[in-house]
Amino acid sequence: MIAGRLHWRPPKAKLAGRQSLAAFDFPSGSLVLTEAGTKHRASLYVLTGEQGLRSVDPGGIDIFTSDLSSFREALTAENRTLKRALTDPRLVSGIGNAYSDEILHAAQLSPITLTHKLEPHEWERLFAATRHTLEFWTDRLRSETESGFPEMVTAFRKDMAVHGRYGEPCLRCGEKIQRIRYADNETNYCARCQTGEKVLADRSLSRLLRSDCNRISEMYGPPLRPEM
Ligand SMILES: [Zn+2]
């Protein structure tokens, strides 16, 4: 999800360069998997049947088939920061760093608020903002792609409200967007809209917000590495 991309190429595409990892040949073209960067985190799994699929499902709820109470139940299973809870695929499916920033800005909630501290009206706001943000971007990206293959896959979209906009003015209030940096990622937020004007300290918070990616990939077991 970070550096992996799929490309649609003419039939029998050659694997050119170190970034090309695999090609799946179809009569009308080749689906090529690439990994940009040097981290070598790409992996392929071969699964059989629905049971096989379930073995790699972290179990998070689907926001579009859930209601407010199951959403709240999932996110309060543990007392976590909103940022970590939203991006944990064991709790909610399909929300990463970029869209959790957008959701929290839309809901006007702080990324470090603990899920056990949220008031009923804030749960309503968070649930509505989560659905609205994902719906908006799903529709938007679908219409941009139209009938073509989605080649411009990125977590940084120029119309995003906060994500990737450190130092730029907030679209709602004009205040400069802030950031909390950790490992190889950052969280963006607006202090005026989300944290009661409080600028959150970088270092002390990084532990609270760290993603759970590593633990999740451990759950999947060792990847299948074909001889190449
Ligand atoms: Zn703002």
Image (cartoon, rainbow, N blue to C red):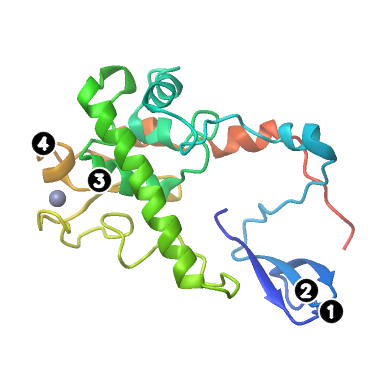
Look at 27% across and 60% down and name the residue there.
Answer: 165
The Cα atoms of the two marked residues, 1 and 3, are separated by 45 Å
The Cα atoms of the two marked residues, 3 and 4, are separated by 13 Å
Provide the secondary structure element on which disc 1 rests. Answer: loop
Tell me if mark 4 has few (under 14), some (14-19) or many (20+) residues whose alpha carbon lies within 10 angstroms of its own: few
Q: Quadrant of residue 157?
A: bottom left
Tell me if mark 1 has few (under 14), some (14-19) or many (20+) residues whose alpha carbon lies within 10 angstroms of its own: some
Look at 28% across and 31% down and name the residue there.
Answer: 112
Q: Examine the rendering and report whether any part of residue 92 can be seen.
A: yes
Asked if labels 2 and 1 touch by Cβ distance under 8 angstroms, the answer is yes
Q: Quadrant of residue 47?
A: top right
Which amino acid is tagged 2? Ser
The Cα atoms of the two marked residues, 1 and 4, are separated by 56 Å
Q: Which residue is mark 2?
A: 30
- State which tag comes first along the sequence, 1 or 4: 1
Q: Is mark 1 within 8 Å of ligand 1?
A: no
